[in-house]
Image: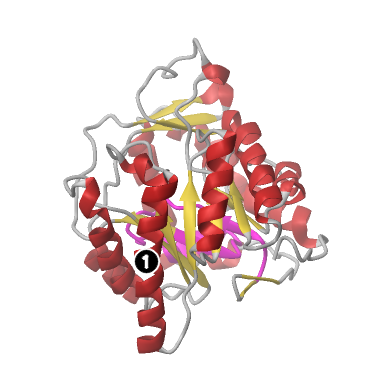
Amino acid sequence: MYALYPFARPFLFTLDAETAHTLALAGLDRATALGVTARAAARLPAAPVTVMGLTFPNRVGLAAGLDKDAAHVDGLASFGFGFIEVGTVTPRAQPGNARPRLFRIPQAHALVNRMGFNNGGVTALLANLERTRYHGILGINIGKNADTPLERAADDYVACLRAVYPRASYVTINVSSPNTKGLRDLQAEAALAALLRTLKREQTALAQRHGRHVPLAIKIAPDLTDDAVRGVARVLVAEGMDAVIATNTTLARDAVQGMRHASETGGLSGAPLFARSTAVVRMLAAALDGALPIIGVGGIDSGAQARAKLDAGAALVQLYTGLIYRGPGLVAECVRALATLAPASRRT
């Protein structure tokens, strides 16, 4: 089935990008319900690795954003991911930004999105998870509602953390989307320290209440200056965070100038992001010196590029835009490329 994606892609690419996204996921759900995905699943080598105190079957995960409401987890799990991250979810449902809000730049293997945390709210996400058969490692990515003032952002993050804590394997704090006004201001050292201190207190209380520690990861932007990246690293260590995800989408357009849709407002993902996101991974690895693991995401569309993220210092990788252009076979390619990699203490 997955070998058929190159044949389906030309049809999907005739459609509006968001319509194609919805149609493809609906088809995946139908195939999963009929048992087709289970029969078509690739045979992948066992390559377990322990990161954040969790044992992952392999190092290749699904990035947040593709399944915001955790409505397609079973089908996506059949691709062979070692972990799946859903969201970004907010306390209350919100429609996100007006359509069109998702654009392809095919010649650059890139996307521009200004989705704006469109999701059904945390209650709906948890209801969807109740119906899933997936029992693997699940990350839940949380954010603030667009109409919540920045000075009250911590309230939204705490509300989401409390709600998802019993179901999550780990929780990601998204302070780096460019599509919620002011959100990236939370990456400034003082603001980030204050937010993470609040969340760390809540994590400690929830761990006592539920009898287990659920790690917290922070997702950062690629557009931070080098000094700001090092500043973020200092805060993450000081506040006792469990991991960092590098990176979210970029506002930079240098690599796609003049291409159709390049000037659309929103975050750019895909191949043009690879170099900068990998550079951020490398800087974080140097600044953190093994204090906490890094999850590398941004521009991976081959097994070699997945390996390059680990060579830069990541412990795990995540995919999204590469799946749109390469299809599910990319997952198996990356898993196989990383299967022979010996665990390194600085990565795990």
- Magenta span covers which residues? 57-85
The residue drawn where x is 58% and y is 66% is 39
Say left or right for 326 vs 16.
right
Q: Is residue 123 magenta?
A: no
Q: Indicate the amino acid at tag 1.
A: Leu
Residue 227 to residue 161: above or below: above
Task: Give the secondary structure at mark 1.
Answer: helix
| 302, above or below 63, in the image | above
> Could you tell me if residue 131 is visible in this image?
no
Relative to 41, 208 lies left or right: left
Q: Name the residue at 52% across, 62% down.
A: 238
**Location of the C terminus (image quadrant):** bottom right
Q: Nearer the viewer, residue 91 or 69?
A: 91
Please give the residue where the numbered disc 1 appears in the rendered image.
199
Give the image location of residue 259, x and y in percent. Answer: 49, 14
Q: Is the stretch drawn in magenta largely helix, strand or loop?
A: loop
Pinpoint residue 340: horizontal percent, then vertical percent: 83, 61
Q: Is residue 286 visible?
A: yes
The number of discs equals: 1
